[in-house]
Amino acid sequence: MPPKRPKSAASSAGSKGKVKGKGKKIRSPTPVEKPDHPEDIFPMVLTSATQELFGCRADEDVTEESPYKLLKKDDIVQDIKTRAAVSDFSPVKQIVLDYPEDEILLVFDRDFTYGQSFYLILTPEAKDRILRPPEPETPAVFESEVNKTPEPKQWISLGSELEIDEEFVRETREKLKYRFSRVRRKFGVPVCFSDRSAADAKDGYLECASYQDSRFSIKQMQRDCGMQAVPRLQSSSAQTQWKFQRNICTQYKPRELSGEEIESILESESLKNFCNSVTPRVLLALQQEQIMNVFLDDWKALGTGAEADDWSGKVSEGLMLYQVFTDQKYTKDKKISSINWHPTINGVIAVALTEKMEEPLNESTTFDVRPSYIVFYCFFDPSNPQLLLECPDDIFAFEFCPSDPNIIVGGCMNGQVVLWDISAYVMHLQGTQSSGKKVSVNTNTFDLDDKNENKTAVVRYCAVSALENSHKARITEVQWLPPTFEVTRSGVPVENKYNTSVQVVTCSPDCAIMFWDVRVPKLLGQSVSDRNQSVDRKAQMTPYSVPDTFKHLDRTWKPLLRVSLPKIDTSGEYAPLKFSFEHYTGNGNTDKNKGETDDGTEVIPDYSQLRVPSAKTLRNMEDVSTKLYIGTEDGEIVYTDWKLGKDDFGRLHSAKPLHCFSIHHWLVNTVQRSPFFKDIILTTGGWNFAIWKEGVMEGPIILSPSSEQVCTVGCWSLSRPAVFFIGKDDGSIDVWNLLEKTSEPTEVHAHITNTKITCIKPWTASPKQHFLAVTDDLGVVRVFEIPKTLYIPSRTESLSMKKYYELENNRLMDHLKREELWMKEKKEAEELRKKMEADKPVKSLKDNVDVNMKEYSDYLTLEESILKGIGLWPTTANPQDT
C-alpha cells in the first residue's frame, strides 16, 4: 500500500473550500503535492517558449552547477495577463501577486527531485535560505579534549545477543573415538618407503570408497545452511568421449628461431618496408586515442535505449502489482464491464459492474434483485468504495465528459442512456485523495438502515432516456463527441458555439448507432425569471439530493439522430459492438467566451443553461470526418459514414457501409485509435488482433497470427507509439513492441488472474509513474505499475513507427497486386483450356463404341499370345466330337 500523502496548506485549503455554482468562474485547484514536497516551493513545467522569454533555458542559461534564476515579478504578471491560461505561471497567479518582493527565485531541477524540471520559491525566507545558506558552526576544539581517551558507554541490551547466541554452534552429541593399532611385533621397526607401480592398483590410482555401516544409521531431520545465488550451470559435451582413464604425460618445449634466422629477418627489406608503412597509422591511432575515448558506448550516446541512465533496458522485468481493489458487498457474483480513471483527480478509478448470466436459472433458484452501481475506488483507501452511482440497470459502458468531469454518461443493459452529476461529491473525492481519510458523508437520503457508520455515499442519476425511444438491446459503447463540433439531425457536422461537449454517441447490437443531445430543446426554453428561479433552487440544493442539471431530459430524452447499418451485399443489418471515429481537434480558433476568461480562470459549463441553437445559424464544417470504424457481433470490421443521404423521394436514409472485412472469427471487443496517429486503429476479437490504417480500403496492414487463447481486450500505450497491450481469456496479458518483434509479443505476463480479463485502461500519474488497470470476470481491479522500458520512448520512435506503417501499407499493396496478377493468369489459363477442349472434333456415340471394341479385341489377342507362350492356353476342341 502506498504511503499516505501528508496534508499541506494548499491541499487542506482546497479540501475545505466550497463548491461554486455551475456556470460561474472558479480558479484552478491547487496541484497535489508530492510526498517529499516542501510547502514553500511549487514544481512546474516551463515550455521552450517560456524558457526563451524569461532567459532560463535548460542546460544553457541554467545548469546543474548554476541552477538559480531570479525572475522579475512584473514580468511574470505581464506574461499571465498576455497569455492568460496558456501561460505556465497561471496556476501560481495569486501567489505571484501576493509575493512581497520584486524578484522571485526560479530553480532548475535537473534530476526531477520534485517531479518537474523547475520549481518556484514561494517565500522570501526560502529564497534567502537557498541563495545565502547559513555557514556551519565550527565548535572550538581544545587540546585537552583531543588527547582525552573516550570512555566506554554502558551496554544497553536491545536483544541482539539472543540472535548471536542462537547462531552459536554447540555440540549436541558425543564425539566419535577412533583407535589405530598395529601388530606388536612391528613396534619400533623402522619404516621404509618405496615406489609403487601404477599398474599394481586398479586404473592406476587408489581410492577409499564409502560404504554403509550396518551397525547404525543416522537420519538427518533438519539442516541449517547458507546459500548464495549463482548463475545457473549448464553442462555440455564435445564430440570426444572419455571411455576409460589412462595415465599419460606430455612434454613440450617452445620452438625458437636460431640467431642467424633472427639476424636475417631484422636485416630484411620486407620488415623495413612493413615498419615504414605501418608506423604512420600506428602514430595516428595513438593520437586519436589521446584526443577521444575510443571505448565510448555509441548505443548509450545515441539515446536509443530505454533511457539515458539505463541503456541496458533492465530497469524492471515487467508489470509490477501496485494495488488491488475489490469489495464483497458490491462485487460479489458480478463482473466488471467498463473502467475509467477520473480525468482530474489522481488515484480515483470508477468501474461498472454487471450480473453474470452464465448459469441458467432453474425452478429452485431464487432470483435476488440487487441494485446496480458504478463504484469509485481510491488509492488512499483501497478497502472501501468512495462513491456509488445508482443505475436503473446494469451498465455496460460509461464515460466522463471531457468538458466537465463531474458529468458522466452510461449505457444500460435495457438500452437506456443515463446521466449523472457528481458536482456535490468532488470535495469528498478530493478529500480522500489529499488526506487519505474518508470524509464523513451523511447518507440518510438513500440509506434505509439505522446504522449510518462508514456508509458510502450513493448518487442517484439525474436523467434517463425514454424506454420506447432507446436501444432495443444492451448498449455496448458510449462516447462523447469532442467539443470542437456537433452534428445536426441529418448527421452534418457544424460548429459548436459553446465549445463544450454536448452530444453523445451510443451503439447496440440492435443494429443502430444513435446520437443524443444533452441540451435543453428550443421548445422547452425558459424565461429569464424562470431561469433565475432555477439558479436559486440549485444554490439551495443540498449536496445529497438529485441535481436539476438534466431535469429537462428525464424520462423524455430522445435521440437526435439514428444511423442504421444495412449489409452491403445481402439483406439484413450489421450488429455493432464497438466503434471509433476521428477526434477532430479544431483549427486553433479559441475565443475568450469559450472555456476561459481574460484572467485565465476556467469556466465550467452549466448544462442546465445550454440551449440547442438553430441549425440555420451554424456553419458547416467540411474538414470534419464523418467516417466510423465499427466492430460487429460476427467479427466483422465495417467502415461507414454516419451522414444521412436522400433517396429519390427526398427522404433521409442511412447509406450502405463503404467496406466490410471478416477478419475476426468472433465478437469484436476493441476498436481503438492510436493516441499518436489518428489514422491507426487497433481491433481485437476472436483469436487475433489487427491494425488498420484509415484510407487503406484493402484490409488491415498488420494481422496477428491466431493464438491459442481468445483475445478479450486491447489498448494502446499512452507514452510509446510502438507498444500496446492485449488481454486474453486465460487471464494473461501480452505486451507487444513493434520496434522489437512483429511476430510475437515481447513480454507475456501469464496468470495475472484465474479468469478472463475484461478491461485494460492505462493512466499516467506523473512523468515517472505510469499505471495499467486490469479487471476480470470476478469483479477485481488490479493496478500494475508499468516499468520504464515500456513507457519511456526512444528519440525516433514516433518517426520509426510512421515509416513502419508505410512499409506495411506498401507490402499490402504489393501483395494485392500479386494476388490480382495470379488470379488473372489463372483465369486466362482456364479460358485457354476450355478453348482447346472446344477445338477438338466431337465424336459420335457409335465412334466411341467402335474404338472401345477395338481396344478390347487387342487386349484379348495379347492375353491369348501370353497364355500360349507359358502353356496355359486350353487346346481347341475337335468339332467332330461334338
Image (spheres, rainbow, N blue to C red):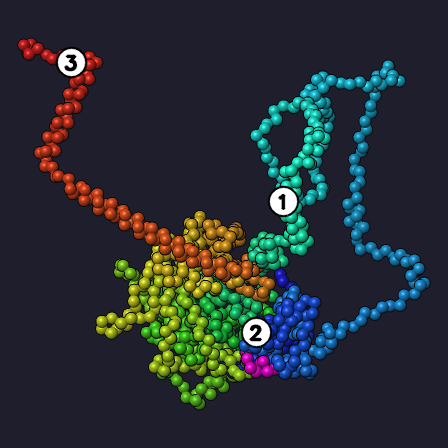
Question: Of 364 and 696, which appears nearest the observer?
Answer: 696
In this rendering, the label closer to the viewer, 1 or 3: 1
How far apart marks 1 and 3 lie (CA) works out to 102 Å
Q: Earlier in the sequence, mark 1 or mark 3?
A: 1
- 377 shown above or below 689: below
How far apart marks 3 and 2 lie (CA) works out to 116 Å
Q: Residues within 10 Å of mark 3 (few under 14, many from 20)?
A: few
Residue 501 is tagged as: none
Q: Earlier in the sequence, mark 2 or mark 1?
A: 2
Residue 277 is tagged as: 1
Q: Quadrant of the N terminus?
A: bottom right
The image shows residue 790 at horizontal and vertical percentages of 55, 57
> Who's the residue at 48% across and 64% down the image?
676
Q: Residues within 10 Å of mark 2 (few under 14, many from 20)?
A: few
Q: Amino acid at mark 2?
A: Ala
> Who's the residue at 22% across and 71% down the image?
648
Q: Amino acid at mark 3?
A: Pro
Specify the quadrant of the image occupied by residue 62: bottom right
**What residue does disc 3 label?**
874
Q: Main secondary structure of the magenta part?
A: helix
Question: Which region shows up in magenta?
Answer: 77-85
> Who's the residue at 13% across and 30% down the image?
852
**What residue does disc 2 label?**
49
Q: In the rendered image, is residue 452 in sight? A: no
Q: Are marks 1 and 3 in contact (CB under 8 Å)?
A: no
